Image (cartoon, rainbow, N blue to C red):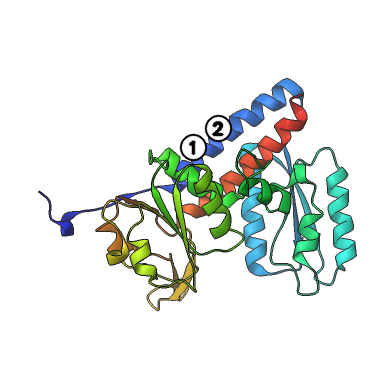
Amino acid sequence: MASQSDHKATVIDGKFIAQTIRSEIAEEVRQLSEKYGKVPGLAVVIVGNRKDSQSYVGMKRKACAEVGIRSFDMNLPEQISEAELVSKVHELNENPDVHGILVQLPLPKHINEEKVLSEISLAKDVDGFHPLNIGKLAMKDREPLFQPCTPKGCLELLHRSGISIKGKRAVVVGRSNIVGLPVSLLLLKADATVTVVHSRSNDQESIIREADIIIAAAGQPMMIKGSWIKPGAAVIDVGTNAVDDPSRKSGYRLVGDVDFEEACKIAGCITPVPGGVGPMTVAMLLKNTLDGAKRVIVQ
């Protein structure tokens, strides 16, 4: 029998799975275009000129073009008032060619994010963060119109890697509105027994060690050590943390919330950082936009 040091976890290739999903979406978009003469439309609203926001938005535009989804770009100045921004969102709500609206966060300090996001039409909330969508996600036998993209991507990675969730013990590390909270609700809907570990939890290590499935979304570089992982567990690492690395041209490298090298010796399967969850988030945004469009176009 192989010793533990010989064990190597299966690395879940998020890039490959995301590309497969994008190909499926492109085919559906082509069919919509042929049959109905219409394609899905995604509006991306960006306020100000934060470099990271610009690069995320550029990536989303490129992904849309690749699958045939039409992009509507709205680049707004940093000093725009909250009322003006809300009015722009209302314009997009009224536009029949727009099936999904994404407001790139964070917004400038003088704008109330919650107010702006709640003004997005429920039927176009492709980020899945509208309080009604999250509320339905939290209720039994209710289905939100859209599930948040990163949590949805985490579950899709598990499904497409043949990992069953029903009856399994799942531990979610982190309780953010964007990942931790919604992914715990999705796991519950998929019949997992779910525990959420957060910064105020006592004895995090022993709770995590009981998990068949770990979703790490704490934003703490390499916080979860190999010794914290149950042998054979599935590990989905949502963390993207920049750590100093003088050997790199950029001066830094990206690592997850899990110590990847150590975890590979214990886990059954694991997502890498980068190349794991990241590509899935964009693929799920495209999928949500397609689904929103189908509700309107296919009557």
Q: Say which of 24 and 198 sits in front.
A: 198
In contact (CB < 8 Å): disc 2 and disc 1: yes
Give the amino acid type for the residue marked by disc 1 in the picture. Answer: Thr
The residue pinned by badge 1 equals 20
Q: Which residue is mark 2?
A: 24
- The answer to whether 32 is drawn above or below residue 14 in the figure is above
Front-most of residues 207 and 105: 207
Residue 39 visible in the current orientation: no
Q: Which quadrant would residue 51 be assigned to in this image?
A: bottom right
Q: Going 59% across and 29% down the picture, which residue do you hit?
A: 27
Side of 278 relative to 128 (left or right): left
- Residue at point 80% right, 74% down? 110
Q: Quadrant of residue 287?
A: top right
Q: Residue furthest top?
A: 35
The reply to whether residue 49 is in sight is yes
Place of residue 109 in the rendered image (x, y in percent of width and height, measured from the top left): 76, 74
Residue 141 left/right relative to 238: right
Task: Say which residue appears at 85% left-offset and 61% top-offset.
Answer: 85
The kind of secondary structure element at disc 1 is helix
